[in-house]
Amino acid sequence: MKRLFNILLYTFLTVCAAGLAVSGTVYFLLRASVPDYDEDFSVAGIDSPVDILRDSSALPHITAGSAEDVYFAIGFVHAQDRLGQLLRARRATKDLLPLEPTTEIDSSTSDALEAYAAGVNAWLGLVSEGGRGRGSPELLIADERMIAAWRPVDSLRIAHAFLSDLRPKSRQELSVSSDLRVPSDRPVTPELFATPPEVSLNAWALSGDRTATGAPILAADIVGPLSLPSEWYLADLQLPTGAAIGATLPGVPFVVIGRNERVAWAFGSTPQKAVREPEAPTGRGAGDYLMMLDRLARSTDANNALSGTSEMLSAGMEVLAIDRETLARWPEREVERPASFRDARLAVLDDRQLIISVEGAIAVQRDTVSAAARALLPLMAKELWFVRSASGIEETRTERLRNEILDKLAQWNGDMDR
């Protein structure tokens, strides 16, 4: 009996020791993969020291002596914080652009892509030296071949994939059933019947004659699939021409939606009719888009920001830019878009306030009355109004419940506040 007890005790202790060893190893590898923002690095590829200051939200504020060093640094921090996301995006887009179309872009954008790739590769080099796990916790179980050197064409492919996500993937015929009678004072919008699962960019702007301060207002909204981490990465790039602050796309060195010290810019996308034949993958659209982002970051006023945009902007997109006095857009005429709940809500809010102040803009953001709910309300009431039960007992019970619900719906104005 004592011998059996000893065997069981030693077995238990061995299992516990093995479990502790495995847990300790896993913890060490995971902990090593988390970047230390207080650490200093000595890397090749930059001309002078670069400062990366993290704020309380860990957002990077990058200061360097040249634009190339700034783009090197944003590549470094993208890889430091989002290495797994970068490598997954590259793998998903590796077949988009079989050739390297870097000759299609100007020298400024090409230099930025080269510097960005060098920054990503600098972090990959530090990871390969050891002591940092695999650079990202999820890469501990990834294929070794996935972690390869970054190239400028990888950034072009990611930009190309982003532009492709703004377009419908297939033709969608939206038909309204004849028995769905939407009242004339309610918007008939495609979202009532189908919602295409696509990424979209929304931009809303007012000229100075509609604002309390006399300066234009620009607001941007990005709609897309929910992901963790987010598809976007906020950063502050202190370029020699001034700061470029806003949302960057990991894999691309430029601020996509943001501002500098003089100009703010944003994009809007309009769902186009799906093409009958898939477009051949080319790098020209992606290269033009990256050149436009580079130009926007260095622009001096709204008109300068949009100069030459007509040759660079992809079909189905619009760009808006404001400075302290001017609102500029391309195309110059507002893009016609299918009716949507967002536009219906904006129209209501626009009619409500002829002059918009900062407080008014905040009120717009906090508005909780849903145009979608107001459009669906009569449809829900219609179904309840005409429902009938077979038995008398069931009819009485249903009638009581139906009346109660109809009374509640009649008192509801579509407010979606929690």
Image (cartoon, rainbow, N blue to C red):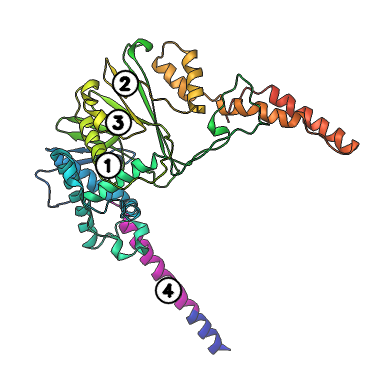
- Residue at label 1? 286
Quarter of the image that includes the C terminus: top right
Looking at the rendered structure, which numbered label has been put on residue 17? Answer: 4
Which secondary structure, mark 2?
loop
369 on left or right of 199: right
Magenta stretch holds residue 173: no
Front: mark 1 or 4 = 1
| Marked residue nearer the N-terminal end (3 or 1) | 3
Distance (Cα) linking label 2 and label 4: 71 Å
Which secondary structure, mark 1?
helix
Q: How many other residues sit within 10 Å of disc 3, few (<14), some (14-19) or many (≥20)?
A: many
| Marked residue nearer the N-terminal end (4 or 3) | 4
Query: What type is the residue that disc 1 sits on?
Result: Ala
Front: mark 2 or 4 = 2
Q: Quadrant of residue 216?
A: top left
Q: Are marks 4 and 3 in contact (CB under 8 Å)?
A: no
Query: What type is the residue that disc 2 sits on?
Result: Glu
Which secondary structure, mark 3?
strand
Quarter of the image that includes the N terminus: bottom right
